């Protein structure tokens, strides 16, 4: 059990693997929380040196055959010291406004068991309207959550979950990735492979090769206002559509092969 003094404390958990590029900035942004814990998947670069230099608590989750971060999420949360946990990726910046907001919520006495936080994503150097608010459920009560070890899953929360209003841009995560076209194409190929086990029960037909990419493009470019981002918005919408095409094509290929 936690003491009354510890009841409103927050641990920040940062999952890492060869994360030296942005890690110092990420740590600088969260160092005023009650704990900063690095859960590392056996990095081979200077990630651990940076973590040690900043006095972070470090735990190791063996990478083994794991190629995604989700299997390490619950392990990291379990290793956190305090009852409230903010899960941060090694390329996400937490604003001082978000920090103050989270502490105000846990001290108010009516804090939900989970809070979904908006995230600002960048492409070709500009924030993408089509990728905002990109809500991610990353603030949670430790004893009320479970994170399934499946790609692109969110934690399961026993209790109430709230979303920070999308209008509060000052409270959004700042995603530093700013992936290039080549990065996105490479990730789409890799992540689509990881999606196959999750979608193995989907009975897609040939028509899905058309309607799923077309709907994703329409959603990204029109419904989510990607057209406001000019050429980068158009390219980003096409890449979103291509990801859906790749998933369906691989599922159909597997079905035919089997």
Image (tube, rainbow, N blue to C red):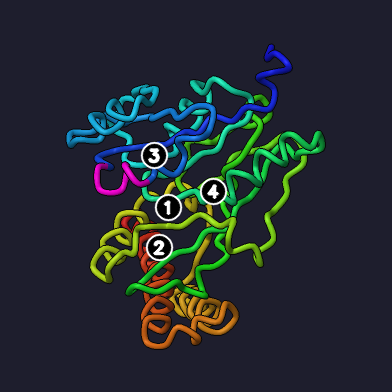
Reading the image, the residue beneath label 4 is 96
> What residue is disc 3 on?
27
**Sequence-wise, which precedes: disc 2 or disc 4?**
4
Secondary structure under tag 3 reads helix
What residue does disc 2 label?
Answer: 247
Look at the image and give the residue range highlighted in magenta.
20-25
Question: Disc 1 vs disc 3: Cβ atoms closer than 8 Å?
Answer: no
Q: Position of residue 136 (x, y in %)?
A: 56, 51
Magenta span has 23? yes
Q: Secondary structure at mark 1?
A: helix
**Residue for point 43% across, 68% down:** 244
Q: Quadrant of residue 248?
A: bottom left
Q: Mark 1 = which residue?
A: 195
Name the side, left or right, on which 8 lies relative to 31.
right
Question: How far apart are the two marked residues, 2 and 3, measured between alpha carbons?
Answer: 35 Å
Q: Earlier in the sequence, mark 4 or mark 3?
A: 3
**Frontmost residue, 112 versus 209:** 112
Question: What numbered label is drawn on residue 167?
Answer: none
How far, Cα to Cα, is label 1 from label 2? 7 Å
Q: Are marks 2 and 4 in contact (CB under 8 Å)?
A: no
Q: CA distance from mark 1 to mark 3?
A: 31 Å
Q: In this rendering, which labeled residue sits more in front, label 2 or label 3? A: 3
């Amino acid at each position: 059990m936690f003491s009354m003094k510890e009841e409103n404390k927050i641990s920040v958990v940062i999952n890492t693997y060869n994360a030296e590029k942005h890690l110092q900035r990420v740590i600088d942004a969260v160092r005023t929380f009650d704990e900063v814990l690095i859960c590392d998947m056996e990095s081979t670069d200077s990630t651990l040196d940076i973590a040690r230099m900043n006095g972070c608590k470090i735990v190791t989750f063996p990478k083994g055959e794991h190629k995604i971060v989700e299997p390490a999420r619950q392990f990291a949360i379990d290793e956190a010291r305090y009852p409230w946990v903010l899960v941060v990726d090694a390329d996400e910046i937490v604003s001082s406004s978000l920090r103050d907001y989270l502490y105000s919520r846990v001290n108010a006495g009516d804090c939900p068991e989970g809070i979904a936080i908006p995230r600002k994503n960048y492409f070709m150097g500009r924030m993408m309207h089509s990728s905002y608010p990109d809500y991610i459920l990353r603030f949670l009560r430790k004893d009320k959550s479970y994170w399934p070890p499946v790609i692109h899953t969110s934690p399961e929360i026993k209790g109430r979950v709230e979303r920070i209003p999308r209008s509060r841009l000052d409270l959004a995560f700042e995603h530093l990735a700013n992936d290039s076209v080549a990065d996105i194409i490479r990730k789409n190929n890799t992540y689509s492979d990881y999606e196959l086990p999750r979608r193995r029960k989907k009975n897609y037909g040939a028509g899905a090769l058309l309607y799923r990419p077309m709907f994703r493009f329409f959603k990204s470019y029109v419904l989510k206002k990607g057209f406001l981002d000019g050429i980068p918005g158009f390219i980003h919408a096409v890449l979103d559509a291509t990801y859906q095409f790749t998933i369906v094509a691989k599922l159909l290929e597997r079905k035919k092969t089997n």
